[in-house]
Image (spheres, grey):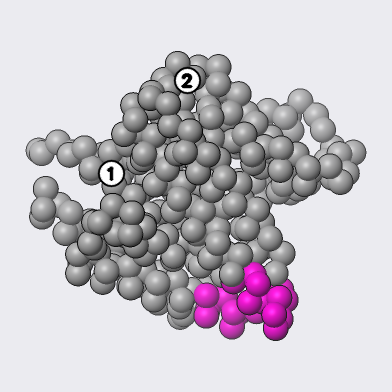
Amino acid sequence: MNSLTTAEAGRLAVLLAMLMQAAGKVAFGTMLTAIPSQLFVLISLTLTATLFLTFGRSGVGLQSWKALAVLNTSTAVAFLCFFFALKLIEPAIAVAVNIGVGPLLAVMIAWVFSGQRPTAHRLVVCAGIVAGCAVLCLSAFRGSGFAASGNEAWLGLAAAAAAGIGTALITISSKRLVEQGWKSGAILAHRFYLVIPISLFMSLGVDMDAVGWSTDVLVLLSAIAVIAVTVPLYLLQFGIRRCDPYTVTVTMTSLPILTFLVEGLSPAYEWSVLTAAGLAILTGFLLVDIGRARRGA
């Protein structure tokens, strides 16, 4: 039995991260309904930063203020833009746009700044992922529509795309820090300097009394935060260390597929032919990319 290559291990880590995020989303939506999403983000990111500042800060490599600034800024942009998009368009549409633009942005940024011309295979995979996410957007639009209309709907789509740009830049800047000798824990320890104050500000108006705080709620909240945020972020860093940004962003398109597998098989879940078609397109092009990578290994 052949052992996994470095890149395969990295891709597997990203897949596991996406599975844990999908499971965490379901757990949060069913077990922590009284906790507003911005408060969950604040608590989970603060917990993550605290853990890695305590146990992982010694892994700092060469000084790289530019990459660190891009990482913190893109993390804040991704969070703010995605949160804004959710106010204007359906979550399924926001996720599809966010995920869909990532691989194409990764190859374009690498081409512009590093001169790495994308191969025909990569361009085809990127186009297929955009097509699959477009079908998912259409499915969501026909199912429940936009939460807003007209210019606000287009603003929501633009915000989701901007969040996708932020996600791609997170991957690229993290990879740059890895190349400068930074360990995964150190990157996560120094990633949230902007987004935590922003999420704190956004949580100021939350009615804390309505949450119904108890020891059981705190334990459950901490457990879901670790499962849905802390561990997946570390697994993503593991994947970024071992793969190029294109491979990471392509593999991240498994999130809607895995989310469907986690929650979509429930009898209460309503799915359509368009949803199945979009997921099938994403699955097909993800498998094509994995197969091509294995043949080239």
Secondary element under disc 2, as helix, strand or loop, is loop
Based on the displayed image, in which of its 4 quarters is residue 9 positioned?
top left
Taking the spot 45% from the left edge, 50% from the top edge, the residue there is 169
User: Would you identify the image quadrant in which residue 266 lies?
Assistant: bottom right
Q: What residue type is labelled 1?
A: Cys
Sequence-earlier tag: 2 or 1: 2
**Residue tagged 1:** 243
Residue drawn at (28%, 44%) of the image: 243
Question: Disc 2 residue type?
Answer: Gly
Residue at point 19% right, 69% down?
A: 120
User: With respect to residue 52, does 159 lie above or below?
Assistant: below
Residue 262 visible in this rendered orientation of the protein: no
Q: In this view, does 35 lie above or below 121?
A: above
x and y, in percent, of residue 28 in the image:
64, 46
Task: Give yes or no for residue 194 being in the magenta stretch.
Answer: no
Q: For mark 2, what is the residue?
A: 56
Tell me: 8 left or right of 143: left
